[in-house]
Amino acid sequence: MGIGVVESSRHLCGHASTISDVIRPKDSTKIKDLTLIFQGYLTNVLSNKPNYQYAPHVVIDVHNGRIPLHYDDRKEYRERSYAMKSLFRAIRVAWLFLWASIATIILCMPVIIAALLSRTGNLAFSLSKIWAYVMLAVSFVRTEIKNKAKLLKGTSYIIISNHQSHFDILALVTTLGIQFRWLIKKEILKIPLFGYALYASRNIFIDRSNTARAIESINKGLNRLPKDAGVMVFAEGTRSPDGQIHEFKKGGFIIAIARKMPILPVTVNGSRRVLPRGSLIVKPGKIQVVIGDPIDTSGYTTDTVQELIDKTRQAVMANFDPEYAGRADVTN
């Protein structure tokens, strides 16, 4: 029996139509067979329950011996579903904000005191890891690191990483296992106590008002860098808007060449699934940090900096897995 398709959506949305109006068989002589089959379907679905019983995609009504079909747009269901999802999202955001506030209040003063009393800032950096661990735990986010053996203890690196999410920071702080400092815009210094604590921890503040001042501020920060501490640089300059690795900026590479510091290429996978750019909703998941082979910068100059940039970017992209969802095994 060849059965045709629904002829037009207007038959399903407006007034009630009989089955012969709505569904037309390719062979009109088969209407009787079609009617018998449909009546059998009604018997199984409706039993003894008349009037507007749900069936897949349609609502069926038995009235005066006719079998009209009505389109079920499920508007009320969609509205309730959307409201529940919105409420659930709000609860998740409030949950993280609550724990971020608690962790900040508890750890703020110890970190500030440690930064003010320590000559290197190493203790303050170590204490800040606690905050990162707490936020990962309450977000139900796990981390793993691959190729950690490539990290040489006692070496100061310019660490070049891709940047997918705010959770990159938490993953890097908790997995690398080495001391490093951040490049931070100088405006943060204006925050009472906190700004000075970051300065006392030997982070590097950048004056971005012009190039000459930026270079001067970076050099001052590097002169204060503790022994064996590295510098973390998100070479893309900002979080990726589409999950891809974009072009790298020169800043971190100029520092590496000027100071003859090796570059450590690092790739972060999975963080965008946890918290994409522009979203406040954190999804449970796993973030992978992959260490690449360190790159010696002694053979490069400012004239060949683009070669160094290209080589580093290729190293980062070689370990990049945009589809990563926590399936990989941990290899230290």
Image: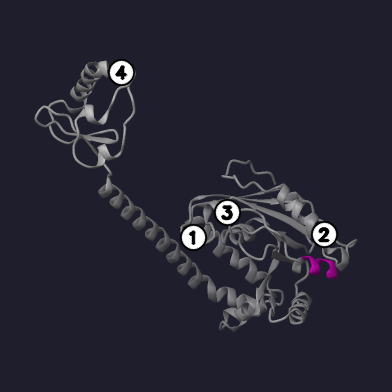
Amino acid of disc 3: Ser
Instruction: Report x, y in % for residue 87.
Output: 34, 57
Mark 3 or mark 1: which is in front?
Answer: 1
Residue at (49% x, 51% y) in the render:
284
Q: Is residue 295 above or below residue 202?
A: above
Mark 3 or mark 2: which is in front?
Answer: 2
> Left or right: 118 with respect to 222?
left
Highlighted magenta segment, given as a residue range: 253-259
Q: Which residue corresponds to mark 4?
A: 27
In three-dimensional space, the C-alpha distance between marks 2 and 4, rounded to whole angstroms, equals 72 Å
Can the viewer see residue 61? yes
Instruction: Report x, y in % for residue 189.
Output: 62, 81
Amino acid of disc 2: Leu
Q: Which residue corresponds to mark 2?
A: 308
Q: Earlier in the sequence, mark 3 or mark 2?
A: 3
Q: Earlier in the sequence, mark 3 or mark 1?
A: 3
Q: Which residue corresponds to mark 1?
A: 279
Residue at (31% x, 55% y) in the render:
83
Q: Earlier in the sequence, mark 2 or mark 4?
A: 4
Can the viewer see residue 152? no
Q: Earlier in the sequence, mark 4 or mark 1?
A: 4
In three-dimensional space, the C-alpha distance between marks 4 and 1, rounded to whole angstroms, equals 54 Å
Element type at marker 3? Answer: helix
Element type at marker 1? Answer: loop
Element type at marker 4? Answer: loop
Whether residues under marks 4 and 1 lie with C-beta atoms below 8 angstroms apart, the answer is no
Amino acid of disc 1: Ser
Q: Which residue corresponds to mark 3?
A: 271
Mark 2 or mark 4: which is in front?
Answer: 4
Determine crowd level at label 3: few under 14, some 14-19, many 20+ residues with C-alpha closer than 10 A.
many
